[in-house]
Image: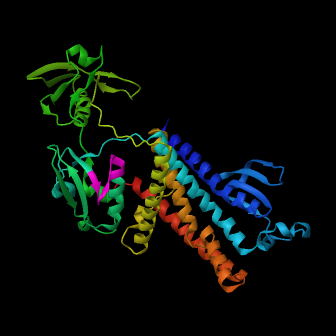
Amino acid sequence: MNPLFGSVFWLLVTLGVLVTFHEFGHYWVARKCGVKVLRFSVGFGKAIWKRIGKDGTEYQVAMIPLGGYVKMLDAREGEVDPALADQEFTSKPVWQRIAIVAAGPGFNLIFTVVAFWLMFLIGKPDVAPVVAATPHSMAAEAGIRTGDRVLSVNGHAVATWSDSMDAVANALLGRDPLPLAVRGTDGAERTVTLPLNQLPAGEDIGQYLDKLGLKLAPVPAVAATVLAGEAAATAGMQGGDRILSVNGKPVDSYEQFQHLVPEEAAKSPTLSMAIQRGEQTLTIPVTARWESLQGQPTNWVIGVSPLAREPAVLRYGPLKAMGASLQTTWESAASTFNMIGKMLTGQASTKNLSGVIGIAQVANASASMGAGWFLSFLAMVSLSLAILNLMPIPVLDGGWLLYYLIELVKGSPVSERTMMAGQYVGLVLLFTLMGLAFYNDIHRFLPS
């Protein structure tokens, strides 16, 4: 699927699922509290599809898919038929109004737990956290060696590459020294402390990760398989051959080999390749071919494939998966609040905020990696929506909850004038936040 089309498609799927679930929370609790729902909309603006349900509610999908709303019978928005007065929103006890407003974020939280549970049940394919360090990087200077296996990050055990990097990324927000327990290729265990406190303030996670230089260990330059009938097989290469050089240029990893083949073949298709087979070192001529192999884009290829990385799949039974889901939801929520707190206090940069463009890119990438990864992505976005909506900003659910909590304390509703002023302030804050996130998305495309 084309990356642009895929990003748009999976963004629409993400927003469609999560917005519908969020708004259904408001709708379901409102109906349970006896409030008449006039409209249930996924999206804003002009309707592209709608129908009237048996309950009299208008259900619609609108043109702008960046949210949704539930419109209830509300005396603040016009005259209410006396016959429907008992179904009007503001006439309900304050605890019912709190329940209706809180139901949207609450349903997002339920969705998060269920999505993580399904992820652990299905399994999320990953690789083992066997790492290396970019030369002269912070990780290299701290003592990370090629082939080290990360066992724990800041005392928390990790079993996969993504788990270890999630923990590292969270620690980067605070820029405190970070201990990693690792096991070297010799089997000895040791602790390596990454001096994150030496990182400059005000940069985003991507810039910090570049300076840190922690990466997956490179795949050895070994031809794990040689495709029959292709150039390498015709030249006499065999599975298990270690590639030492191409046209005299040394090869240290399979990734380096992948770059060298098209680079050298563009000069001359016939490549002089030095290989090691057992105790022998051989030099053979291999004539690369300009073709597409196994559905890949057309390029200079010789028909070999690399060794696979050590797999690490997180998969549990139903009960253990639920426990893991609840724990992951709790830890992810704590991490999100930690990031918000550090941004508010200036300890973390607002450059870490992502908008709709960033979400679209991650949606497409996670969907291409399989159901487990996409469920994990949906869970994290759903949790973020729940937390964002609970922030005490007028126009968001959290702002309305703040009004109703004040009403509980003072015994009477907040004045309409105060509400209107709050709505204007809330809109300014919300659009500022959205503008900053959009700016960050655009800035990431620009050359540094």
Q: Could you tell whether 372 is left or right of 187 in the image?
A: right
Q: Quadrant of residue 279?
A: top left
Q: Position of residue 13 (x, y in %)?
A: 58, 45
Residue in the foreground of this view, choosing between 303 and 5 = 303
Quadrant including the C terminus: bottom left
Q: Position of residue 280 (x, y in %)?
A: 8, 21
Q: Is residue 363 visible?
A: no
**Magenta region includes residue 143:** no
Q: Is residue 214 visible?
A: yes
Residue in the foreground of this view, choosing between 10 and 434 = 10
**Magenta region includes residue 161:** yes
Q: Could you tell whether 62 is left or right of 355 in the image?
A: right
* Residue sitting farthest toward the front: 319
Query: What colouring style does the render use?
Result: rainbow
Q: Position of residue 124 (x, y in %)?
A: 43, 42
Please report the residue visible at 25 percent of the width from the left and 26 percent of the height from the top: 224
Q: Quadrant of residue 195?
A: bottom left
Please report the residue visible at 36 percent of the width from the left and 23 percent of the height from the top: 293
Provide the residue span drawn in magenta.
151-164
Q: Position of residue 118 (x, y in %)?
A: 52, 44
Please report the residue visible at 58 percent of the width from the left and 65 percent of the height from the top: 389
Relative to 361, say whether 79 is above or below: below
Q: Could you tell whether 444 is left or right of 17 in the image?
A: left
Q: Quadrant of residue 365?
A: top left
* Residue sitting farthest toward the right: 83
